[in-house]
Image: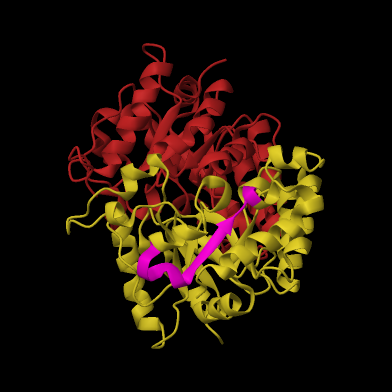
Chain colours: A yellow, B red
Amino acid sequence: MTGFGERLRTVFADRGRLCVGIDPHAHLLEEWGLPASAAGAREFGLRTVDAAAGRVGIVKPQVSFFERWGSAGFAALEEVLTAARSAGLLVIADAKRGDIGTTMDAYGDAWLTPGSPLEADALTANPFLGVGTLDHTFDLAEAHGKGVFVLAATSNADAFTAQRARLISGDTVSAGVIAEVSARNAQHTPSGHWAALGFVIGATVDWTEAGLIAPVPPAPILGPGFGFQGAAAEDLARFGGAAPTVIVSESRSILSAGPGSLAARIEERANLYRSEGNA
Amino acid sequence: MTGFGERLRTVFADRGRLCVGIDPHAHLLEEWGLPASAAGAREFGLRTVDAAAGRVGIVKPQVSFFERWGSAGFAALEEVLTAARSAGLLVIADAKRGDIGTTMDAYGDAWLTPGSPLEADALTANPFLGVGTLDHTFDLAEAHGKGVFVLAATSNADAFTAQRARLISGDTVSAGVIAEVSARNAQHTPSGHWAALGFVIGATVDWTEAGLIAPVPPAPILGPGFGFQGAAAEDLARFGGAAPTVIVSESRSILSAGPGSLAARIEERANLYRSEGNA
């Protein structure tokens, strides 16, 4: 079983580091001429998968925009997840789930169990209730070559309250999350490999201000905030020594091209990051 | 439009403060002789609603145990939500959603928009990305007489990393969350009313250690950890001045009675909290 970190490294080598967000929010559905409904979200997702397949290696459906439509939205999401994985895309379910005990375990089971209707290759998770609450989800990921991206540091000003608060050690909460997950990665990752458990770190985060250092062992980093939200290819340098494992995630900058120009836009953005210091 | 805090106060007066968790996890489904599937979760949820109706005022479906089964699980949850609201129960969707920008907004829309397939009376939310990310969700709740319970302090040891870290002010993150939401409540709550926006605070949290003081204005507090998890009626005293607004949430202590004894167990637990210092 190849671990998620190594799967990701292969994807980077073969297809580059761009990840296309699948965010069927009301505004984009309207721009695309699609109905604001589960059917619209389904169509939006499937067209994005079609345009992404063969051009990039990774997609990231944003779960909330499907959840908005209840069970019908989840049925649409299941079709999108299946289509993406069948097309050979690595799928990150951006659900940011977090809870305690068996409740969190059920979220992990929902998204990372092979054969589950919502099966994805990786899940984003929220550590506010403690990194230890994610243990079962980590176990499950490691057992099946899947990944987990733990929220560590985001760049929105609102986030500073909880994320930049200080632990007794003097470290920020963001740094504490990285240290705690990395300690586990150190035990489970063969030497020279990329780890299975990674982080969400915003593309415009000031690493010094946030008190961050590059994870050891190297771990996948999901970097939202590229494209529309302001970060450009050169902002990869912000990640310092962690730059080689950064997944560049773009959503609106790509999706705003509309269905007719989507494939060309994806190609263009993918080339940009391929030319800019690949892993 | 009666605000959520006042709706809750009426429920406390009429039916007491006990909230019955609807947690169809695998272990309980087996104990109840139900299949580990969406159909099992549906049956489990509907039977619990039947037993709760007329005996208590509040139920809390745990979303992860439905999400485990994908879109079929969400279809089951929709039936349970509808049945509970039709039976006059106040329904708290325990989903602990958290994200930024329009992504978080879509979660708010999914659970709090009147007529949405997942419509509930209140939603639990995660503030790790900043209390400000919940603004749209708060607006929506206030506009429709609905509530939001923001995770503030939980009693699991894992939670201490993020929740007990210190802000520049010296306050804990937990206290900071309460202060930030309370500042908004102060602007939106008529004098003498209970506020619409509340908190999740574990029943066994040490308020002094967590640096908490009772929210002003008084706000609904969802208190998990009663019953099976160890807290008893007398632990209401832990909440100090905040005790009058505490929703006592029990799940396994009730659900473990099995379908045959469920109604009797609910009656027994509800009486316990009615006799013990009601609001």
Specify whether A218 is left or right of A112.
left
Viewer-proximal residue among B262 and A169: A169
Which residue is located at x 33 percent, y 21 percent? B217
Q: Is residue A242 in the magenta section?
A: yes
Which corner quadrant of the image does residue A110 belong to?
Answer: bottom right
Placement of A182 over or under B68, stated as above or below: below
Q: Is residue A71 above or below residue B181?
A: below
How many marks the image carries: the answer is 0
Q: Is residue B91 magenta?
A: no
Can I make out residue A17 in this image?
no
Q: Is residue B211 above or below residue B216?
A: below
Relative horizontal placement of residue B107, taking residue A279 as reference (left or right): right
Vertical placement of B261 versus A11: above or below? above
In the foreground, A272 or B112: A272
Main SS category, magenta section: helix
Residue A175 in sight:
yes
Quadrant the C terminus of chain B occupies: top left
Residue at the extreme top: B191
Magenta region: A239-253
Place of residue B253 in the rendered image (x, y in percent of width and height, measured from the top left): 44, 52
